[in-house]
């Protein structure tokens, strides 16, 4: 948890509010793109979502939560590439069986990539698929910030904000080459805030504290942060030159 107290004039308070309201696209790190992974190869083959895992081992990342994340990723891929054939994780699980598929996701969740033995097994079990994408939630951090500002009349304004920052790593595996042909990490932060103006008199301040205590907002839900990450990933995959124009 992080707390910051800032005293400034009214003009500064307006600037802080504007900054808090800015929405930035996800940032990408460590992008690696194999030259064999092109729009033509993607367009002529099929891609499947192998699964969305998490580095965190807790009830919040249950199979039901994972299925919801996988659906978000499928929707992002289909919207960014309307003509692309995208198979759901269920199709991969059906070829492996639930236990074998669960073991595969566990390995990816622990390491963040698949070894050669896993890739050989996938290639043998998924002969009709060219590409399989796996994603892992590498970070999920909630921050709380308190910002106190003073206007020109010394009236106090308090902003309580809470943000969620998530980082997701991706790997796209080519079943014919049995190796990763695209990998990278995307980071996105979203926040929400509650704003309070302090009454001028001590009595009014006490009454306000009792009747309307300052509370932090709930952090943004995970799917609100994951969706722009998945969108950015899908849009970063090879596209036709006509679409990029």
Image (cartoon, rainbow, N blue to C red):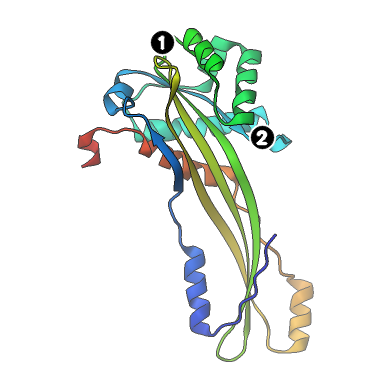
Instruction: Report the number of numbered marks.
Output: 2
Mark 2 / mark 1, whichever is N-terminal: 2
Farthest front residue in view:
116
Judged left or right of residue 198, residue 40 is: left
The location of residue 34, given as percent across then percent down, is: 36, 29
Q: Residue at x 44, y 45 (%)?
A: 28
Give above or below for 237 relative to 153: above
Tag 1, which secondary structure?
Answer: loop
Q: Residues within 10 Å of mark 2 (few under 14, many from 20)?
A: some
Mark 1: give few (<14), some (14-19) or many (20+) Cα within 10 Å. Answer: few
Answer whether residue 81 is visible to the viewer in this image. yes
Judging by the rendered image, the residue that carries numbered circle 2 is 61
- The quadrant the N terminus occupies is bottom right
**Residue 80: x percent and y percent?**
36, 35
Figure check: 218 above or below 13? above
Front position in the image: 27 or 86: 27
Pinpoint residue 95: horizontal percent, then vertical percent: 54, 10
In terms of secondary structure, where does tag 2 sit?
helix
Q: Which residue is mark 1?
A: 128
Occupied quadrant, residue 56: top right
Q: Is residue 147 above or below residue 205?
A: above
* Left or right position of 105 against 28: right
- Please state the horizontal and vertical placement of residue 206, each as a whole percent of the image: 78, 81
Q: Residue at (78%, 87%) from the top-left corner?
A: 203
- Viewer can see residue 231: no
Q: CA distance from mark 2 to mark 1?
A: 30 Å
The image quadrant where one finds the C terminus is top left
Res. 90 image quadrant: top right
What numbered label is drawn on residue 56? Answer: none
């Amino acid at each position: 948890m992080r707390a910051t107290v800032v005293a400034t004039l009214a003009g500064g308070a307006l600037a802080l509010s504007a900054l808090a309201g800015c929405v930035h696209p996800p940032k990408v790190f460590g992008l690696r793109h194999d030259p064999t992974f092109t729009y033509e190869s993607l367009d002529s083959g099929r891609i499947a979502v192998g699964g969305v895992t998490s580095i965190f081992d807790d009830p919040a990342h249950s199979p039901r939560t994972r299925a919801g994340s996988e659906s978000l990723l499928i929707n992002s891929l289909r919207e960014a590439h309307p003509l692309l054939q995208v198979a759901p994780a269920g199709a991969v699980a059906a070829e492996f069986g639930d236990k074998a598929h669960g073991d595969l996701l566990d390995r990816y969740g622990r390491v963040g990539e698949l070894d050669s033995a896993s890739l050989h097994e996938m290639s043998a079990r998924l002969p009709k698929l060219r590409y399989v994408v796996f994603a892992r939630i590498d970070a999920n951090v909630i921050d709380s910030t308190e910002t106190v500002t003073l206007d020109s009349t010394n009236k106090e304004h308090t902003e309580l904000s809470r943000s969620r920052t998530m980082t997701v790593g991706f790997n796209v595996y080519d079943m014919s080459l049995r190796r990763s042909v695209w990998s990278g990490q995307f980071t996105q932060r979203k926040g929400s805030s509650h704003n309070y103006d302090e009454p001028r008199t001590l009595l009014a301040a006490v009454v306000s504290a009792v009747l309307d205590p300052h509370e932090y907002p709930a952090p943004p839900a995970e799917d609100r942060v994951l969706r722009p990450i998945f969108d950015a990933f899908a849009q970063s995959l090879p596209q036709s030159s006509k679409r990029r124009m």
